[in-house]
Image (cartoon, grey):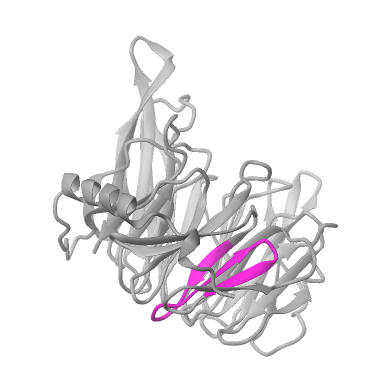
Amino acid sequence: MRRTAAASIAAGALAAALLATTLLAGASASAAPGDPASGWSGPEGEVHRDVAVSGSGRVFSVSLPGPGTQDESWLEHGRWLEWSRVDVPASSQGGVIAGPGDYAMAVTGSVSWLFDGTGWDGPVTVTAQEVTRSKLVGNKDGDAALLWSAAGGRAYLSRLERGGSWVTRRVPSVLVDAPRDVAINDAGKVTVVWAAPKGTTAEIRRTVIQPGATTWSPSVALGTVDHPRPRLRLVTEGGGRETLLARDKLWRQASSTTMPTYQLRTSNRAELAAGDSLTRLVWAGMTGDEHRFYTRSAGTSWGPRTLMWANDGPGDCPESPWFGVGMVPSGRSYVAVAVRTDVGETTEVCGGPFAAFVTLDRFDGILNTSHGVDTALQITPYQIVGGTSGPIVLEYEPGNWTVDWRMQFYDR
């Protein structure tokens, strides 16, 4: 059932606010070849929103309030002055993906919502069980995969081929409550990785379900890391080549049909992003009193280490440093970075942040470095999203008393 305009934001007030923001920023313009250009600010919100950009350039988001903090969630879509919101039952679990044209799929809790080009249709039941610890991923065609836990902690995966129906199967090898991540490539292959604790270390394991298959591949151990509950980050290029970060170790496939092998050790503070045929690694470190942000890209081989940005500041300021990375299918990357530094005569007060927004080409060349957002919290990393067209979206938590979460749009 499609929700009607009765639940939408008042268009006049929103358009006026957005127009004022745009006039203050100046007229939007293309910044090629070193995009992005200053864009527009989207509606602010009280909770974190997962964001996606479709092939048409339309932006989609779903709000995910923390348990007990809000009595509703909402679905949003729009571009520039056109922005609509639809209220749905509250859920802290879910996400949104987008595909070619004007297509998007959102999940809130145990139900999904389909954007059909003009509005949201739904809800459609994904599972009758209570959903916890979920993550939604998609590929360029709009196929979706939802990794989630039932109330008892067992892991399940629900898959939906665009135009089809949800199919749910248990992921049999994943330990209850183990750190894990999921990715789906353009062919529809789904990969799940997790960390099996072994005392003070953890064994990193992997299993795969192929498109059209009904059973998972036997789980395989990739290696160990020196932490029982490491942070995991799995990404896949469109062609299927996977890269995995587990704490400070990185594994990567030579091709989509080989097992991931150990490649290098990086920082505990690292992030990944992937496009059609390229993957980018970004990490933070310190040299003396200088925070430094580095990157390397990987296609058929690893590119050189590139210093993107640096800023003086001691390492004992809380909430410092932090960053996020996103990549569009062609391989162009966008990195938001920030640090806090000492102010006054005491190290107990930290000022800033001092921030930058960096654009890189697929060959690790820095195309553009501009001033970053003025305020942010390190509690949650920057979310950076882009599609084949349309804006680059930066979603972050400003950390002040008047605004809880913000989306900033950059033209390209």
- Image position of 304 with respect to 330: above or below: above
Most extreme residue toward the right, as rendered?
152
- Residue at 38% across / 73% down in the picture? 329
Residue extending furthest toward the front: 6
Q: Is residue 408 left or right of residue 263?
A: left
Location of residue 219 (image quadrant): bottom right
* Residue 43 in the image, given as x and y percentages of width and height: 38, 50
- Of 6 and 207, nearer the camera is 6
- The segment highlighted magenta reads 95-114
Residue located 55% across and 80% down the image? 143
Q: Is residue 83 visible?
A: yes
Residue at image position (67%, 65%) is 193
Asked whether residue 85 is drawn in magenta, I would say: no
Q: Does the magenta stretch include residue 110?
A: yes
Residue 97, position in %: x, y? 51, 69
The single residue placed furthest to the top in the displayed view is 345
Relative to 297, 234 lies left or right: right
Residue 305 visible in this rendered orientation of the protein:
no
Quadrant where the N terminus is found in the figure: bottom right
Most prominent secondary structure in the magenta stretch? strand
- Quadrant into which the C terminus falls: bottom left
Looking at the image, residue 255 lies above or below residue 149? below
Question: How many labels sit on residues?
Answer: 0
User: Is 311 or 41 nearer to us in this picture?
Assistant: 41
Q: Position of residue 45 (x, y in %)?
A: 46, 46
Image position, residue 197 (x, y; %): 78, 52
